[in-house]
Amino acid sequence: MRQAVLNLEESKIREVANAGMGRDDVLPFWFGESDEVTPDAIRQAAIAALQAGETFYSHNLGLPALREAVAAYTSALHGPVGAERIGITSGGVNALIVAMQTLIDAGDDVVAVTPVWPNLTAQPRILGAHLRCVPLRPDAQGAWQLDLPALLAAITPQTKLLIVNSPSNPTGWTLTRAEQTAILAHCRQTGTWILADEVYERLYYKDDTANGAAPSFLDVAELDDRLVVVQSFSKAFLMTGWRLGYLIMPPTMTQEVGKLIEFNTSCAPVFAQRGALAALAQTADITPPIVAHLRQCRDTLVPLLQTVPGVETSAAPGGMYAFLRVAGFGDSLELAKRLVTEAGLGLAPGVAFAPEAEGWLRWCFASKDVGRLGVGVERLWGWLAARA
């Protein structure tokens, strides 16, 4: 077997979850998904497609109608984007690996901003790239910030690809427009591709946006820029299990991506694509209530956590996570396992996302029942108090 595969670490999030799955007394906040089901209109569209017998292959790049709908949706958020720039994939994860397979060779220099969802740093290693990480740093209030000069210094003419996730999983950190402009200008000079994971762009809680989305590289990029944006239907439409995502890329890249999709998955399931068409047709009715509820969840959980002695956290501008540190506990994996077994509380260990996140925990606050968040905080507080 390939050494790059043998060297892969198993998911530490799964390691914690496996310790608590099947236990009715555990409140699970470890995975990055809501506990609400996909809206009925989306499910009914997929059911109708199956009943109509749409059980065959589609175009490698997706149904033409869906590519057009994605282009229109993206254009409404970020300005004109043509369907020739869209490729439908079998999930955001598939979009990421297809993009990386298109752009990087073994031995290429890749830079990633961390802490970040581990797939974004594992995939370049699987492909044999040389990965260098530029860490975010928490300020005194627990909010994570980018050292922009350090990032720009790390990106050289030898850097083939920059990977950046904003809004971020797990920290909720979000790039500013000024930071995006500076990064794009620098990458133009070095000839570096940007792979922007923007799957949380609609889960954005600042009121300084006119389009209901976080700042995107698409807002500042030109058509011929070396920019690939990864998107997913999972977060803003509650479709995690549907495994449906898409790429927005330069038109010169689309045909090549279509070839790779053929050799990866052939195409996304048609009935899932029909569900996505329904989601986009009703986005004004589906997404804003989801975002409003998540804002309520964030604004419930974070102030409660801030009252717990020894807990450090802040309200992030985007995403669906609270990232917290508990004083006196340096091993986040051990702490997360103990919270499962001793407190009935399931959180993700920070070390799963990067070494610099050791000692931190990720709490997914996407809960249909906001009251469960308060119960979780009570369990954390009680467990800590018993050990004080």
Image (cartoon, helix red, strand yellow):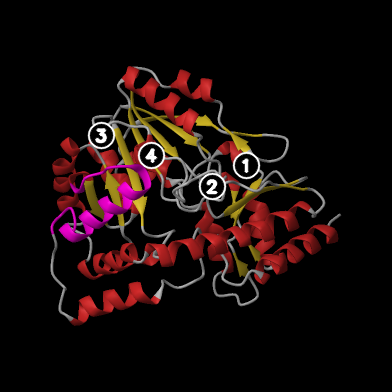
Task: Identify the residue at the far front of this view.
Answer: 210
| N-term-proximal mark, 3 vs 4 | 3
Q: Which residue lies furthest to the bottom in this view?
A: 51
Does the rendering let one see residue 251? yes
Q: Name the residue under label 3.
A: 103
The reply to whether callout 4 and callout 1 are in contact (CB within 8 Å) is no
The Cα atoms of the two marked residues, 3 and 4, are separated by 13 Å
**For the residue carrying disc 4, how many other residues have a C-alpha within 10 Å: few (<14), some (14-19), or many (20+)?**
many
Please, what is the three-letter code of the amino acid marked with disc 4?
Answer: Ala
Residue at the image position 36 percent from the left and 23 percent from the top: 187
Q: Where is residue 82 in the image (x, y as percent from the top left)?
A: 21, 45
Q: Position of residue 313 (x, y in %)?
A: 69, 47
Q: Mark 2 points at which residue?
A: 352
- Local SS, label 3: helix
- Which quarter of the rendering shows the N terminus? top left
Q: In the rendered image of this protein, does residue 113 appear above or below residue 167?
A: above
Distance from Cα at disc 2 to Cα at disc 3: 26 Å
Residue at 57%, 38% in the rendered image: 355
User: What amino acid type should be assigned to the residue bearing mark 3?
Assistant: Leu
Residue position marked by numbered label 1 in the rendering = 358
3D distance between C-alphas at marks 1 and 3: 31 Å
Residue 63 visible in image: no
Q: Earlier in the sequence, mark 2 or mark 4?
A: 4
What is the span of residues highlighted in magenta in the rendered image? 59-83
